[in-house]
Image: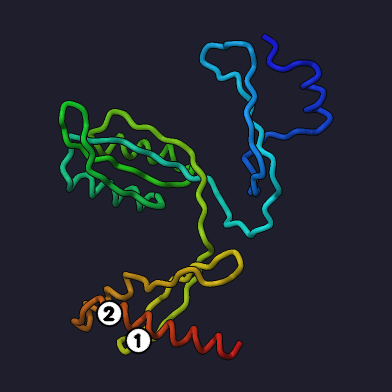
Amino acid sequence: MERVTPTGAAILRMLDVQYGPLPAMRVAASGYGAGGRDTPGQANLVRLLVGEESTAQETPTEPIAVIETVVDDSSPQLLAYVSELLLEAGAWDVYRATVQMKKGRAGVQLTVLCRPDLVPAMREMIFRETTTIGLHWRLENKSSLAREFTEAQTPWGPVSIKIARWPSGEVANAAPEYEDCRAIARKHSIPLKQVMQAAMRAYSAGHAKKETRA
């Protein structure tokens, strides 16, 4: 059937309309228009948004794959092992959550976040290493702040500090690396929280000195 009138097609062609994601914008008005044809399974609607392009700096985005499956007949040890394998294979993150399934059964939802090109390998690993017989996956957009590392000197040794920055360059967050703090705490038999607090104090003091010099 005809999906657009000749006049509508000519207008779209002359305006060089492009298809793509919604741009960053400040919406001034929005509206809907409905057609008169009833097409089964399809909404005969058009939506219009009018606004000004946003000039604010945006955090960069990249595609991310989300793989999910629910398992109700595997031991916690098996799922913990699978999670380790998935992370070693390149997954950005793997997490598990308890869910209530049909017929009152308790299950575990396994979620994997990874690069889109790793989906085939991740799917194969989940099928091979777990008892699931089905999963689903989708593509989403991931926004993340720029990250960098610096070192903070504690009384027991250096600790890496992860710093996240806004697009403007300002520091959004800073946190000591867990593995560094854990190693120092175990080596010197001191509380982990004490090491983390000392690392943040050292970082804050050094950061304050840099700002004073600037």
Residue furthest right as drawn:
14
Could you tell me how far apart the alpha carbons at marks 1 and 2 are, in whole angstroms? 10 Å
The quarter of the picture where residue 109 lies is top left
Q: Given the image, on which type of amino acid does mark 1 rest?
A: Thr
Q: Earlier in the sequence, mark 1 or mark 2?
A: 1
Residue furthest top as drawn:
1
How far across and down, in percent of the image, does residue 153 sit? 39, 86
Residue appearing at x 36%, y 71% in the figure: 177
Label 2 sits on residue: 184
| 55 up-or-down from 76: above or below | below
- Camera-side residue: 49 or 188? 49
Left or right? Give the position of 55 relative to 66: right
User: On residue 97, which mark appears?
Assistant: none
User: Element type at marker 1?
Assistant: strand
Image quadrant holding the C terminus, namely bottom right
- Camera-side residue: 123 or 145? 145
Q: Given the image, on which type of amino acid does mark 2 rest?
A: Ile
Residue appearing at x 47%, y 71% in the figure: 163
- Camera-side residue: 34 or 42? 34
Residue appearing at x 34%, y 43% in the figure: 111
How far across and down, in percent of the image, does residue 121 sit? 40, 40
Left or right? Give the position of 39 relative to 105: right
The quarter of the picture where residue 78 lies is top left
Tell us which disc is closer to us: 1 or 2: 1
| 147 up-or-down from 137: above or below | below
Q: Residues within 10 Å of mark 1 (few under 14, many from 20)?
A: some
Label 1 sits on residue: 154
